[in-house]
Image (cartoon, rainbow, N blue to C red):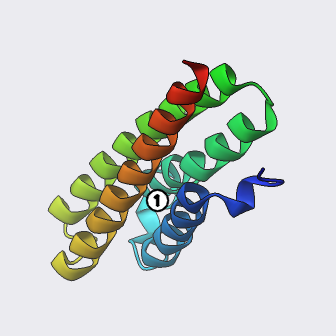
Amino acid sequence: MLKSFRELDAWKKAHELALSIYSVTGSFPQEERFGLVSQLRRAGSSVPANIAEGFGRRSTKDFIRYLEIASGSLEETRYFLVLSRDLGYLNGRDYSWLDEACNEVGRLLGGLSQSLRKRLG
């Protein structure tokens, strides 16, 4: 049995994604500091935060609900990455790498959610 959300692969990859988002947004224009940078960082960090919160609820049903919220935040993150690329703030290489990281987090969230649903019966 897992003792901490830190042991979950979905959380680990989501945390790496959040750290990467903080890193790449550091070079965004200063005028976006309270706009796109803030929104992208908030959405990106919401993914691992919701995984952690759901884990802490100690109810499988609640955990699944928080994984769904994390998935919603992941999709919001994807949109802000597209917007960042289209505005020219994010180069194609970084966008592709971050998009693939989102895909991986999405697969892990889906697998974890499916596993928990099976446990519920």
Position of residue 25 measured from the top left corner of the image (x, y, whole percent):
45, 71
Position of residue 80 measured from the top left corner of the image (x, y, whole percent):
33, 51
Position of residue 99 measured from the top left corner of the image (x, y, whole percent):
27, 63
The foreground one among 9 and 40 is 9
Tell me which residue sits at (60%, 52%) in the image.
48
Q: Is residue 9 above or below residue 38?
A: below
The foreground one among 78 and 108 is 108
**Residue type (three-letter) at the residue carrying disc 1:** Val
Tell me which residue sits at (15%, 60%) in the image.
86
Q: Is residue 56 above or below residue 19?
A: above
What secondary structure is marked by label 1?
Answer: helix
Tell me which residue sits at (44%, 53%) in the image.
108
Tell me which residue sits at (28%, 66%) in the image.
100
Label 1: few (<14), some (14–19) or many (≥20) C-alpha neighbours in 10 Å:
many
Position of residue 3 measured from the top left corner of the image (x, y, whole percent):
84, 54
Quarter of the picture containing the C terminus is: top right
| Quarter location, residue 90 | bottom left
Q: Is residue 27 above or below residue 33?
A: below
Task: Count the labels in the image.
Answer: 1
Q: Which residue is mark 1?
A: 37
| Quarter location, residue 76 | top left
Q: Is residue 110 left or right of residue 88?
A: right
Q: Is residue 111 left or right of residue 67?
A: left
The foreground one among 78 and 91 is 78
Q: Is residue 80 left or right of residue 46?
A: left
